[in-house]
Image: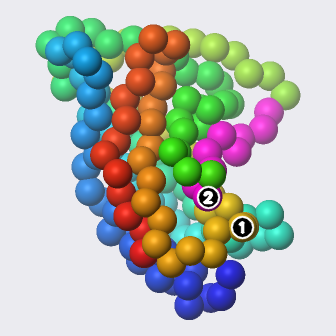
Amino acid sequence: MKRGKIKEILLILMFLFLINVPCSTADESSLKVEISQKGSIEENEFFNGLFVVSTQITNIGKEDQTINEWSCSYGLSWAANIPEILTGLEMCARNVPGNITLKPNETYTRDLSISVNADADQKLLTFSLGFNPTEDLNWRSSDTDIH
C-alpha cells in the first residue's frame, strides 16, 4: 500500500474513532461503545496497517450487564462485517476467562489491536464493528465509511 494512501486511511480512522458508536440489543438494556486510536499505523509484510484503539464499553442501561473477558483474546469478542478489517490479533500461551459486571453508567476500558488486511486496495471501505460479550448478546455499531 502506498504511503499516501496509508496517511489518508489514518486521517479518516482518527476522525472515525473520535466519534461515539452507540450499540444496542433488542431488550432495554444496552451498552455504548467508544473507540479512540492510540499511536500511529504500523506496516509489516502481513498487514497494510496495524493500529491499537482504546475501547470503552459503558453500560447505559438501568440494570447490571455482565460481559465475558478473556485474558489475552479480547479481540475475538469483536468482529467487523467485512474481511478487510481484522480483529483478534492477540497471541498468548494461556487464555483465562473472566466476567466483568458493569453497573449502570460504569465503563470498562481496554486496548484492542485492529488491522487493515494486506489485500485491501479499495479507496472506500464500509464496515461495522460488532461486540459479542456472550453467546446470546451482540451489540453492533452502525455502518461506517473509511475513504
- Residue at 41% x, 24% y: name it: 138
Residue 86 is situated, as x and y percent measured from the top left of the image, at 63, 50
One can see residue 79 in this view:
yes
Query: Which quarter of the image is occupied by the C terminus?
Result: bottom left
Report the residue marked by disc 1. 119
Nearer-the-camera pick, 39 or 8:
8
- Residue at 55% x, 51% y: name it: 82
Q: Do the residues labelled 2 and 1 touch (CB within 8 Å)?
A: yes
- Residue at 34% x, 42% y: name it: 141
Query: From what the image shows, is residue 17 above or below residue 3?
Result: above
Image quarter of residue 139: top left
For the residue labelled by badge 2, is the local secondary structure a helix, a strand or a loop?
A: loop
Q: Give the range drawn in magenta.
A: 84-92
Give the left or right position of residue 11, taking residue 80 as reference. Answer: left
Q: How crowded is mark 2: few (under 14 residues within 10 Å), some or many (20 or more)?
A: some
- Residue at 62% x, 22% y: name it: 70
Report the residue marked by disc 2. 84
Give the alpha-carbon distance from disc 2 to disc 1, as whole Å.
7 Å
Residue 89 is situated, as x and y percent measured from the top left of the image, at 70, 45
Q: Does the magenta stretch include residue 87?
A: yes
- Magenta part, dominant SS: loop
